[in-house]
Amino acid sequence: MLTWHSASLWLVITTLAMAATGSKVLSENVDCGGGSVVGGETCQVPPDQARYDHYRIYNVQFDTEEQIKLFQKLEDESDSLTFIGHAREIGQKLSILVAAHRVADFADLLKTYNIQHRVLTYNFQDKIDSNLREVLPDSIDPSKLDWQHFFHLKTIYAWLDQTAEKYSDRLTVLDMGSSTQNNRILGIKLATNPNNKAIFIEAGIHAREWISPATATYIINELLTSQDAGVQKLARDYNWFVFPSVNPDGYKYTFEHDRMWRKNRQLFGTSRGVDLNRNYPDHWNSTGSSSDPTRYDYAGPSAGSEVETQRLIEFIRSHAKKEQIKTYIALHSYSQMLMFPYGHTKDRVYNYDDLQEFGKKATAAIKAESGRDYVSGSLYETIYPAGGGSMDWAHAELEIPIAYTFELRGPPDSQDLFILPAVQIQPTASEAFTAIRTIVEAAAEKGYYK
Ligand SMILES: *[C@@H]1O[C@H](CO)[C@@H](O)[C@H](O)[C@H]1NC(C)=O
Ligand SMILES: [Zn+2]
C-alpha cells in the first residue's frame, strides 16, 4: 500500500512539475522514450506518430463460407487487424495488416481453420520509414517539385501558385473553400477556349493514397509542358479542372501523425473521420460502408454531412453545366483497376457498353506502355459494392456521362499497400495519363463531346 501511494504521489508531483514548466525537462527516472534514462537532463519527447513496427501483411484466401463468416466476425471484433476490404466471397483474396501483438494469435487462427495464406510483409514500419525518406521537406522551393519524391500539401499548393504564374495565359488557381480544419481545397483550371468541353479530376480523397495527388500534379505538368502533339491537342481541345487534394486535413495527418490514415478529420466523440468517398448523397449508407465512426469506411452521420463533400458538390453543381464538364475522374490506389459506375448496384448504367469499351481500350494502352495489368469494369463488379461514392454521384446527379475511378499501382497483392515507393510515381502517373487520354479520345470518337 505504502509503495503504491508513494509511487502515485511521485507521479502526481512529476506531472504537475512538467505541466507547470510546460517543458521537456524530466526528472530522474523518467524514460525519454528512446530507451535512455536521463537524470535531470532535457531530452527529446518522441513525436505523436503512429508506428507499425513488426506489423505483418497477410494475404488470405477464402475457400468456404465458414471461413468468410469467421473473418467477418474477426473484423467486427478487432481493431488490431486492418482489413483492406471485407470478407465477402469464396475464392476472394484479402490483405490484412496485423498488429505486432496479434501476430501469434492470428497465425494460430489461420492454422486452426486451415486458411490459405501468404505473408507479404514482415515489418510494415520498414516500408513507412523508407517512404518517409522520399518526402522532401516542406521548406523547399516549389520549383523543386518533381515525380521522384512525395510532397507536403504546402509544397503542392505553392507549386500550383507558381505554375499558374508561369502559365498565366492558360492556368488559374481555384479555391473550393476550406476544409473541416481550415485547410484550403485548391486546384487549377487549364483553359484555352471557353467553348471547350471540360474534364474534372479529383485526387487525394483518401489521405494515405499518396500516389493520387502525385499523379494529379503530373497530369497538370504534362498538359502544360509535353512535346507530344497528342497531349498538346488534349490541352487545347478540352478544359481541365484538377484538384490534387480534396481531403487536405487527412493528407496532412498522414505526414504528421499516421501514414495509414484514410478519412477526413471530423471529430465524433472519441474517434475521428468520415470516409469521404462514402459520404456523397447517392445511395448513401446503402452498401459497402459502416455506420461506426471508428471504422475506416464510416459513411458519416448523414448524406453529404462533411465539409469537404459539400465543397466539392457546390463546386461541381455550379460549374458542371456552365463549364460543360463531361468527364469525371477520381484517382485512388491501390489494386490496378479502372472502374465506372455503378458502385452501389450491379445494375448497369445506360452507357455501360461504351464505358466498358473505353475502359478496355485504356487498360490495353497501359499494358502496351508499361506491361502492367489493370482490370476494368463497373466498380460494383470489379472491386466491391460501395454506396455514397463521388463518381456515382457525379454520373447520376450531374449527368456527367464519362466517369471513372482509378485504383493505381500496385497490384492487388501488393506488399506495400498504400506505401508505393517513389521510384514508381513517374511510371504510374504516366500510365494513368495514357489511360485518361485513351478514354477521352475514344469518347470523342463516339460523340460524347459534341
Ligand atoms: C445506415 O445503415 C445501417 C444499416 O442498414 C443502419 O443501421 C443505420 O441506421 C443507417 N444510418 C443512418 C444514419 O441512417
Ligand atoms: Zn481510395
Image (cartoon, rainbow, N blue to C red):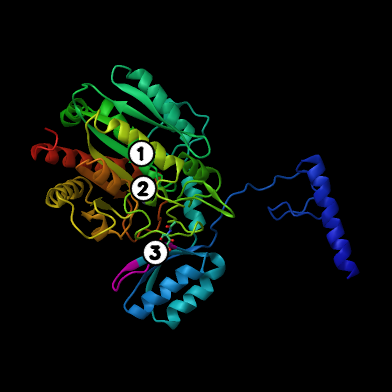
> Which residues are drawn in magenta?
83-93
Q: Is residue 84 magenta?
A: yes
Q: Which mark is residue 313?
A: 1
- Residue 315, given in percent of the width and then of the height, sits at 35, 33
Q: How far apart are the alpha carbons under marks 2 and 1? A: 8 Å
Name the kind of residue labelled 1 in the image.
Answer: Ile
- Our reading of the magenta stretch's main secondary structure is loop
Q: Is residue 95 visible?
A: yes
Q: Are marks 2 and 1 in contact (CB under 8 Å)?
A: yes
Secondary structure of the residue carrying numbered label 1: helix
Q: Which mark is residue 95?
A: 3
Secondary structure of the residue carrying numbered label 2: loop
Q: Which mark is residue 114?
A: none
Q: Quadrant of the C terminus?
A: top left
Q: Which mark is residue 280?
A: 2
Q: How far apart are the alpha carbons under marks 1 and 3? A: 33 Å
Quadrant location of residue 335? bottom left
Q: Is residue 237 magenta?
A: no
